[in-house]
Image (cartoon, rainbow, N blue to C red):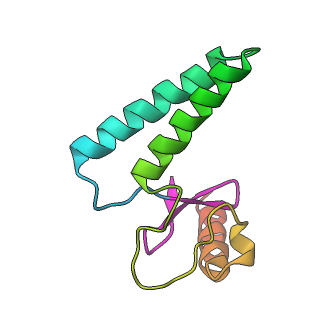
Amino acid sequence: MLTTPDGRYIVVDGRLWRAADPRLSAADKEQAVSELMAARRAVRAAAGDANALRDARRRVDAAKRRLGERGPVWWSDGAPDYNRRMVARTPYAAWFQERDAQDRCEE
């Protein structure tokens, strides 16, 4: 998994996704991730049931907020949030291009 140098994002298919808050204790993170996975399974199981789907999606959102992946940013330096943006259109573009070039050279 590729993480930005400041640890704020992971990169998936060229897109930035906010990383979990590193200040969470291991136990809190483990519990939130467990709830997230259970909620995602509930989303899959709720096919055809609008009420169950809505509830499952609320659980996913709550777990992601608990992890710091949604809602207010967990950093405090005033930097903007680039969550869900293509890395090439953010200040991380040069870093990502350099990493991509390094990866191609290693192949």
Horizontal and vertical percent for residue 76?
Answer: 39, 79
Hey, which residue is sitting farthest front in the picture?
A: 51
Which residue corresponds to the image point at 40% horizontal and 38% vertical from the top-left?
A: 33
Q: What range is drawn magenta here?
A: 1-18
Name the quadrant of the C terminus: bottom right
84 shown above or below 46: below
Q: Residue at x 60, y 63 (%)?
A: 103
Q: For this rendering, which residue is in front, 62 or 75?
A: 62
Question: Which image quarter: residue 93?
Answer: bottom right
Q: How many labels does the image show?
A: 0
For this view, does 17 lie left or right of residue 14? left
- Is 21 magenta? The answer is no
User: To which quarter of the image does residue 61 belong?
Assistant: top right
Image vertical order of residue 11 relative to residue 58, above or below = below
Residue 9: percent from left, percent from top: 52, 64
Query: From the viewer's perspective, is residue 49 above or below residue 15?
Result: above
Q: How far across and how far down the image is residue 64, in percent?
A: 49, 47
Q: Position of residue 1 (x, y in %)?
A: 51, 52
- Left or right of 86: which side holds 37? left
- In magenta segment, residue 16: yes
Residue appearing at x 31%, y 38% in the figure: 30
**Left or right of 89, for residue 55:** left
